[in-house]
Amino acid sequence: MPVLQYSGETFKHGQHLLLLLHGARNSFKQQLPLNYKATIKNNRWTGVATIPSSYFPPKVTKFNAYAIHGSGTNRTYESLYPVPTGKYTDPDFHKLDYFQPINFKGLLARNWSPQYTSDEWKQYYPNMTYTISTIWDGKPIDHDPVMISLDRDQHNNVIMSVDAPFFNDPANPGGTPGKPFSGLWDYEVAEAFFLNDQNDYLEVELSPHGQHLLLLLHGRRNSFKQQLSLTYTAAIKNNRWTGKATIPGNYFPPKVTKFNAYAIHGSGTNRTYESLYPVPTGKYTDPDFHKLDYFQPINFKELLPGNWSPKYTSEEWKPYYPIVG
């Protein structure tokens, strides 16, 4: 499992060095700019650096600090959290197993937000956040929007996060949280559809009460697998709910190119269907989330590069994309 690391070095004479690392010692960016000032007075020095929040990888959990001085045989390496005495013969500040926890969420809350994005880390965390601001036929919604974020974890799964108003209408469908629930679309739900150019797609439905429903479809509305397993948790707090699903990479059809997202709530005549990419106002009389022509492009190759690899294989999609070799 790759370890994500940020490294910053400051000097008493005002110089600095910042590196971003993807895995131990694997630096991919160096010499980033920094607002830094240092002062020497008598036998002490002070320095203040303003580090842009985008320099940090998402969800920082651990930390260490070091100091170095001296020359030749007097070179001295100091560590906030050292390695065990006698275990190693030489200093190595990249012994990541000895880093200790830091409450970085308390220090920089946005670093832990599902909507956190960083151009510096984009190649490893291509966060995509979508706001559903219209109902199914293009008219504006009259409440805070549902937000859906897509990201990738270190195991080439897609992380789908939901941050949404909680209507509690309809009520809890009653299924076991964390398990599939047939007909979830009849309740309060957030949905995402991932489509390729062969009209094969994955449908993901998430409930504020913890149930989920995943379907694989070969052609419009032609479902051939339902109720796939999923790691999913949801929480309701006051008038909002959040959900986080880890979608296995092999659930997606090869070479996903388009996407749409939806939200549903309400009962009876108050049933409301919302769409990220709606159909034209007045063109249809009823909502239909399988109007594939209105899906819009998504840079899925950036989000999940393996999905676009010539070597991509999936047991789930094997009936339509045979595994060769």
Image: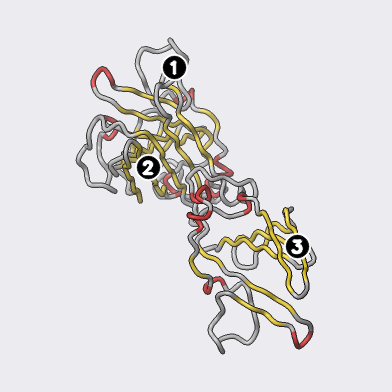
In the image, what residue occupies the spot 45% across and 18% down? 138
Which mark is on residue 93?
none
* Disc 2 to disc 3, C-alpha distance: 43 Å
- The residue at which mark 3 appears reads as 38
Label 2's element?
strand
Residue 97 against residue 252 in the figure, above or below: below
Q: Which amino acid does label 3 sit on?
A: Ala
- The residue at which mark 1 appears reads as 139
Residue 308, quarter of picture: top right
Label 1's element?
loop
Relative image position of residue 115 (x, y in whole percent): 50, 42
Residue 273 against residue 87 in the figure, above or below: above
In the image, what residue occupies the spot 61% across and 60% down? 22
Q: What residue type is labelled 2?
A: Thr
- The residue at which mark 2 appears reads as 242
Relative image position of residue 36 (x, y in whole percent): 73, 57
Instruction: Please state if 299 lies on the left or on the right of 158 as rendered.
Output: right
Q: Which amino acid does label 1 sit on?
A: Lys
In the image, what residue occupies the spot 55% across and 31% down? 297
